[in-house]
Image: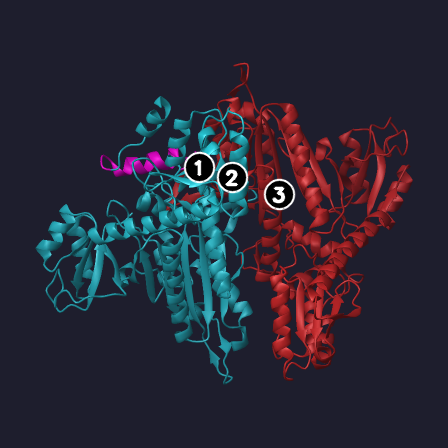
Chain colours: A red, B cyan
Amino acid sequence: MANDKKMVEQITSMDVDFAQWYTDVVKKAELVDYSGVKGCMIIRPYGYAIWENIQRELDKRFKALGHENVYMPMFIPESLLQKEKDHVAGFAPECAIVTIGGQNKLAERLVVRPTSETLFCDHFKDIIHSYRDLPKLYNQWVNVVRWEKTTRPFLRTSEFLWQEGHTMHENEEQAREETLRMLGVYEEFYLNCLAIPAVTGQKTEKEKFAGAEETYTIEPMMHNGVALQGGTSHYFGDGFAKAFDITYTDRENKIKYPHQTSWGVSTRMIGAIIMAHGDDNGLILPPAVAPIQVAIIPVAQHKEGVLEKANEIKATLEKAGFRVRLDDSDQSTGWKYSQYEMKGVPVRLEIGPRDIESGNCVLVSRVSREKSFVAIDGVENEVQKMLAFVHDELVARARKNLEEKTHVATTYEQFLDIAENKPGFIKAMWCGDSACEDKLKEATGGVKSRCIPFKEEKLADTCVYCGRPAKHMVVWGKQY
Amino acid sequence: MANDKKMVEQITSMDVDFAQWYTDVVKKAELVDYSGVKGCMIIRPYGYAIWENIQRELDKRFKALGHENVYMPMFIPESLLQKEKDHVAGFAPECAIVTIGGQNKLAERLVVRPTSETLFCDHFKDIIHSYRDLPKLYNQWVNVVRWEKTTRPFLRTSEFLWQEGHTMHENEEQAREETLRMLGVYEEFYLNCLAIPAVTGQKTEKEKFAGAEETYTIEPMMHNGVALQGGTSHYFGDGFAKAFDITYTDRENKIKYPHQTSWGVSTRMIGAIIMAHGDDNGLILPPAVAPIQVAIIPVAQHKEGVLEKANEIKATLEKAGFRVRLDDSDQSTGWKYSQYEMKGVPVRLEIGPRDIESGNCVLVSRVSREKSFVAIDGVENEVQKMLAFVHDELVARARKNLEEKTHVATTYEQFLDIAENKPGFIKAMWCGDSACEDKLKEATGGVKSRCIPFKEEKLADTCVYCGRPAKHMVVWGKQY
């Protein structure tokens, strides 16, 4: 057992240094590698397989709601980006710019897309003419670039992968519905596929997307109490439509501007999975997106019949639709146990000579780590139950973490005290003035408004900072 | 029938102007739109759905052979691109270069990937140490950029989508096997999914990939006799491994260089589908990748029971695994017939009141356009048969085209005459000297060697250009 002990020791304990724990896990579980390209990451097979599972699950949901995938160019002529003034102001500082093409200096510089509202609008202008052309429900799965000075794998990199939905509607009501519908899709996906319950709500004016009228957000909490902006959905009104001169003839034959939304989630979600569920033994992956759901470890695999039975079980489980890895390498059993624990595989199945004799095998869940003996006959049902148990347990733990690390502040002193001493979210009243957000951020070294949650409570009558009448309850917190 | 007639007339006849026919089809079938970004295309939902089907089919094949998907950064530091001298010489003229990031001039310029050998090698260096780490069988689905002056949707655009496989092996033999295995996957995919039989073989020294020892290619012929480089697979030897100092400890504990391959196909394949199968009525899509395999057109749909029955049939067909569109819009039946013909849907199913009475419906294949009456009960089997018929018929037509437009030249005069008067491929002997390739290209206004086919014939003893002893039979042709 020397080997596996050594491996586990290579992961820094969460309580000692959470940032180092994160770095250790992403490297040792072989999710990413650092590249020679500043600020960019290599997503390795195990990490990319999580992303493929995320894509499959989300894409299914998007298409079920009538969305279609498209592909827009990744270059945006600078003049196009500048058409909507708030938008360009928000993104200009983060742009990577192509100035040379085919060995010649370009007449117009090209921005590598930080997001694609402008390209979609340029296209919508050409294809939307009548109410019959609406709604347009588009999505694309692409890479985007936002120049970053300090980067961290999955959480903040200059290039990342995401999906961006862009939709156009006949009127405000339909566009608003779409904005909230897609935030709802994210919320359901976070809960049912990533096993992460989260706070959802509306961003304040200060924190909304550049060019949006309103931004809605899903804000999961990480194990250490820090927030991650997990996904956003924007209502644009007709601002971009006006800037890009997109009009259509409505049912009464009048010329109108369509109303617009966009919404996106990214590879950052893999960071959320790591930090919401992981422990000192490594990753814990939610079954719905785990590349390997069951790791079969043969015990005394050189003994007659062991590998044969292990392969039989593998075939049974694969036929039942599970993602299975049988590790028959010459590594020690102990090493394998640690390895698949570190990789966060939800269920381990052990099978040895004595088990075969008794017609049983051993199941161990990544969350409880207790052994249970189950009959090989019908093992697929037991695996199904254990995967469901892992999912539910992860949800319960994450919910407990979210609840325990959410604190109420009704006075400025309380706010400062919590910000200083209790990692997590702070619920507090707010007057609606951005200046108070600035002051609170400054006083606390980075606590920002996460959102005005859909589920508001009335904690007090006055703003926690300025004492003026409160307009909203806000959830505050530090973020990645 | 005025409407549908009008629509069909908007497509230029292939025989009148093939290039214009192509442009008409890609636009009117809504596969692409031109973007405001020079040289880049917008892939619209119908075009992107073909790409998604291609991806799914190929990805399945790659994974069945043990390949894993990864994601590399899209930026390549210029110094990294320059590490392999033939490689940089080949790609430098086509590069798009980022010189500004986050409003600052970059210390090192970043090339937007034209291909990713250099990035993979930089990563392989970090993760390959022992023979136990081999083979590494990686693939990625990404966008790449090669700056182009003249562009045409799918065939030649500055940005395009593709997959690039990159593998590392213990020795030459295994790497060579992989190179040919993956060309074989492409050949099988072209035939069984795209319904395109094609010539396969090895590129001449002059036409091989920058940095490769050998390049193998699949060369389908378009309806007009012009070739399209349909996909390539490269054997690199250990050239890149040496340039990037990638070594591993072999089974005898000796330090060795691994041997490498790469292989790729792109959205250009959609161009091949269009030009190999299309006709004057528009697209004809091979069933395996058609976004809609069956278009159900209700006749007299306002009559009681028609839409109900149409929806029933739709559900039956979808349950059987077919991709189905029921068009119950208020467009005329004739318009719908033309519309789905233009969009290349392999099978049309008509269902009207009289059909329902008799328990039948009408199936029409896109290739024969003949009506056949089949029982609604068991219609899924008839649809299956008709889809298989469409596939086989497309293969047969494409094979006939390939055979009829392949000509033998044993003398220089014959070669010139065929090049001038008979569009298609020319089979002719070659001495092995690049100078003869240059001369033939010059004399014919662009006829180049497509490949030395795996199935060589001995047509003559001497080179068709210089008369020196022939080394190989080469297939020659103009290309897109």
**Is there one chain holding both mark 3 and mark 2?**
no
Q: Secondary structure at mark 1?
A: strand
Contact, mark 2 vs mark 1 (Cβ under 8 Å): yes
Instruction: Kindly tell me whether residue A227 is visible in this rendering.
Output: yes
Q: Which residues are magenta?
A: B15-38
Circle 2 residue: B313
Residue A342 picture quarter:
bottom right
Residue A285 drawn in magenta: no
**Could you say where residue B48 lies in the image, as x and y percent from the top left?**
47, 43
Under mark 2, the amino acid is: Ile
**Could you say where residue A138 lies in the image, as x and y percent from the top left?**
54, 36
Q: Relative to residue B455, is residue A116 drawn left or right?
A: right
Q: Secondary structure at mark 2?
A: helix
Vertical position of residue B252 compared to residue A226: above or below: below
Under mark 1, the amino acid is: Cys
Contact, mark 3 vs mark 1 (Cβ under 8 Å): no
> A84 or A69: which is nearer to us?
A69
Per the rendering, the mark at residue B361 is 1
Q: Upstream in the sequence, badge 2 or badge 1?
A: 2
> B85 or A227: which is nearer to us?
A227
Per the rendering, the mark at residue A61 is 3
Where's the N terminus of chain A, which quadrant? bottom right
Residue depth check, mark 3 versus mark 2: number of the one nearer the observer: 2
Residue depth check, mark 2 versus mark 1: number of the one nearer the observer: 1
> B393 or B24: which is nearer to us?
B393
**Could you say where residue B374 lies in the image, as x and y percent from the top left?**
42, 41
Chain letter of disc 3 in the image: A
Please tell me how crowded label 2 is: few (under 14), some (14-19), or many (20+) other residues with Cα within 10 Å: many
Vertical position of residue A225 compared to residue A366: above or below: above
